[in-house]
Each structure stands twice: as structure tokens, then as C-alpha cells.
Image: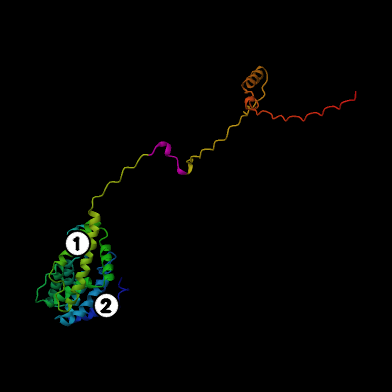
Amino acid sequence: MGVIDAPQWLLPAFVRSARALGAGADNERIEASCEALIRLWSTPERRFHNLRHVIDMLARVDELAAESHNPDVIRVATWYHGCVFSLELRETYQRNGGEDEVASAAEAARDLTALGVPQATVERICELILSLKRHNLADSDIDAMALNDADLGTLACGPQLYKTYRQQVRAEYEHIPDLDYYRARRVIIEKLLSREKLFSSPLGMRWELPARENLRYELRLIDAELAGLEAPSTPPAPRRRRCPSRQTPRCRRRRPRAPRPLRPRCHSVTPPRPPPLLGGVLMVRTLTRWILSTPSPPPPCRRPRHLSLPRLHRPLPPRPAPPLEAP
């Protein structure tokens, strides 16, 4: 989100807050300072701690303005509290990455002094910004409590918005390995949950319960991620070497054929084919071998005599006797 994409009410709101603090510069100079802040908050590496984060904090400051002593001081401190941002590996591993409160306080002191803000007010704004580094608040500093609650109010959003918040913060630190990121994130969440109370102002205490619920849920997710990352990796099973005869692709393998049914034998033997006709002595030898190798046909199947049935002879009728002749 650049200067052109910023809401139109941001510049007038910053000018009003600066005028309320006693800035003596003209409006163009104050608007130029606001545009420079918008550019600082709109750098590409900012995924969550960007201009949208400032707008959300200003909205929560307005909610808590009724119980603060000087709301304009808190608003200007909100503008400068994280204007200096760094994601270098060295600073990140030293837990100084992200919003640099010390450098942001120095930038606020330099810029506000140039705008003509009184020195006491500038020192008070720098004090509020530095209080966000460790969140060590005095019980009597109601303005510091309101600024702290406005900064941590993101933790009390709805579950889906909190999921988007987790994804955006991880995207900011995408150059950090998962194992290192989740370990550092778990330390931060455990430190927040170990505090007696997250929100100190009377109006901000209504965010205590949903914020702790979101933190506990994220802690369970981190524990699950770390369990998978810290588990010893099992080496892959050794691959079995295949027989060279089985290296043929499946598409080229021949399936075993079913055995053919046995045919009943016949008494007649089929003679082999005659050899091709050759010339000369070789032809005579070949024909001779072929004739000798040809088996003789088996004798016809005859029934043995001892198995033949005897014929049944009918007795012939007796011949009539010839007639006797007269003597």
C-alpha cells in the first residue's frame, strides 16, 4: 500500500495530532513528514507490520482514548513506533529483527523536533515507543498501557483473522528456516502466556480471553510442526536389485501360455515329409534314407480267432422220402 493507496483521512489526521502537540511547522511540512512515514510503512518486505497495522492500531487507540490522558501523544507514538523495520539475518537471530523501537524512537525525535514539537513532548513520545520493546509498564502510566493494548490488540481478533495474521508474520520471515522460526515463535508465545495479564488498561482487559485462546491454539500448532521437524528422519529402505532377466518392461514380457490338451494317439503314423528333390548322388542317398526311415504301416486291426464267436448252425429240415414205386 503506497501513498496513493492510503486512505484520504490519514494526512489530515496526522496534521491534527501534530498541531495538538504544538508543532509550529506549516501544513505542507507536516504532510511531507506524514507521506515519508507512509512510504516507510509500505515497503515490500512488510507483510503484516505495514500501513494496515498502523491503521488498526489507530482505531484501537480511538477505542481506548476515553481512559488515556493525552490521546494525541499516543497517536503520534503509534505512527513512529515501528517506522524503522529490518529483516536482516543477524538482527533477526539476535531477536532484534522486525520493528526496531530504538531506531524508530530516534527517527521520531529527529522528525518531531524539525516540526517544532516541544522537547518535553518529544521525549514523552520516545518513552512510549521504547516501552513497546519489552512491554515493561508502570502501573501508573495509563498512556503506556493504552499504547501497549493497542499494539497487542491484534492477538484478540477472530480465529480467521488470526490465521491471516499468522500467515503474514510467517511470510515476513520466510527467509528463516522452519525449525528456527517455530522455535523462536514458541519462545515468544510462551513468554506472553506466562504474563499475569496481557492487557493492562481497563478497557483493554476485554481482549484478554480471546487473545489467550488464540495464543494457546497457535502454540499447539507449533508443537505439532516441531514434532515433525525434530523427529529423526528414517533412512529409506534399500532398493532390491532386480534380476537382469526381469529388466524387460512389463509391456514386453510374455505371459506363460496354458498347456495344450493332449490329443489321443492314433494307430496310423504320419510319414515325414519327403525331402526336397536334389540332383545326383545326394538325391539318391537322401531318398534311400527317407524310405528306410519311413515306418511301415501297422497291420489292420483283426480280431483274434480265439475271441471269435462260434457260428450257430440251424439244422436243415429233413428231406422228404422219395415215393415208393410199385413192384
Q: Quadrant of residue 3?
A: bottom left
Q: Residues within 10 Å of mark 1 (few under 14, many from 20)?
A: some
In the rendered image, which quarter contains the C terminus?
top right
Q: In x, y percent, where is residue 2?
A: 30, 71
In the image, residue 76 sits, relative to residue 183, either above or below, namely: below
Q: Can you name the residue that lies furthest to the right here?
A: 327
In the image, residue 25 sits, relative to residue 295, either above or below, namely: below
Instruction: Residue 134: tell me if it is visible.
Output: yes
For this view, does 230 lie left or right of residue 139?
Answer: right
The one of 262 and 136 positioned closer to us in this rendering: 262
In the rendered image, which quarter contains the N terminus?
bottom left
Residue range corresponding to the magenta coloring: 242-250
Query: What number is the disc on residue 10?
Result: 2
Q: In x, y percent, where is residue 146?
A: 16, 76
* Mark in front: 2 vs 1: 1
Residue topped by disc 1: 186
The one of 234 and 17 positioned closer to us in this rendering: 234
In the image, residue 192 sits, relative to residue 299, either above or below, namely: below
| N-terminal-most mark, 2 or 1 | 2
Colouring method of the image: rainbow
Residue in view at x 25 percent, y 77 percent? 31
For this view, does 326 lie left or right of residue 99?
Answer: right
Q: In x, y percent, where is residue 276?
A: 65, 25
Where disc 2 sits, the SS reads: helix
The one of 223 and 240 positioned closer to us in this rendering: 240
In the image, residue 130 sits, relative to residue 286, either above or below, namely: below
Distance between the alpha carbons at the discs numbered 2 and 1 = 35 Å
Q: In x, y percent, where is residue 302?
A: 65, 27
The kind of residue on which mark 2 rests is Leu
The kind of residue on which mark 1 rests is Arg
Q: Is residue 21 on the magenta stretch?
A: no
Residue in view at x 66 percent, y 17 percent? 281
